[in-house]
Amino acid sequence: MSDFNEFWEEQLRDPEFRDEYEALEPEFSIMQALINARKSSGRTQ
């Protein structure tokens, strides 16, 4: 396992950190939808 993965798992054990990270899920979903739409239409920017 990489050092980053170990760090990330440690951070996610903190309930406050995990709550804040999970609160960003709607924003991440929107960004991923935009990325997918650009890819499917052949656009890069």
Image (cartoon, helix red, strand yellow):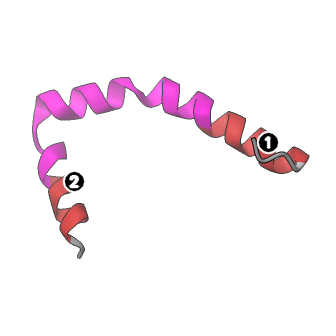
Check disc 2 and report its element: helix, strand or loop.
Answer: helix
Q: What span is in magenta?
A: 10-31
> Where is 42 relative to 16, above or below?
below
Q: Where's the C terminus, which quadrant?
A: top right
Q: Residue furthest bottom?
A: 1
User: Which of the 4 image quadrants contains residue 17?
Assistant: top left
Q: Amino acid at mark 1?
A: Arg
Closer to the camera, 12 or 43?
43
Q: Residues within 10 Å of mark 2 (few under 14, many from 20)?
A: few
Relative to 32, is 34 on the left or the right? right
> Where is 28 relative to 10, above or below?
above
Relative to 40, is 34 on the left or the right? left
Residue shown at the point (61%, 28%) measured from the top left: 30
Residue shown at the point (12%, 32%) measured from the top left: 15
Q: Where's the N terminus, which quadrant?
A: bottom left
Q: Which residue is mark 2?
A: 8
Percent coordinates x, y for residue 41 in the rendering: 89, 45
Percent coordinates x, y for residue 37 in the rendering: 79, 39
> Where is 10 relative to 25, above or below?
below
Q: Which residue is mark 1?
A: 38
Closer to the camera, 35 or 13?
35
Residue shown at the point (24%, 73%) measured from the top left: 2
Residue shown at the point (50%, 25%) measured from the top left: 27
Percent coordinates x, y for residue 9 in the rendering: 19, 55
1 or 2: tag closer to the N-terminus: 2
Q: Amino acid at mark 2?
A: Trp
Q: Is residue 11 magenta?
A: yes
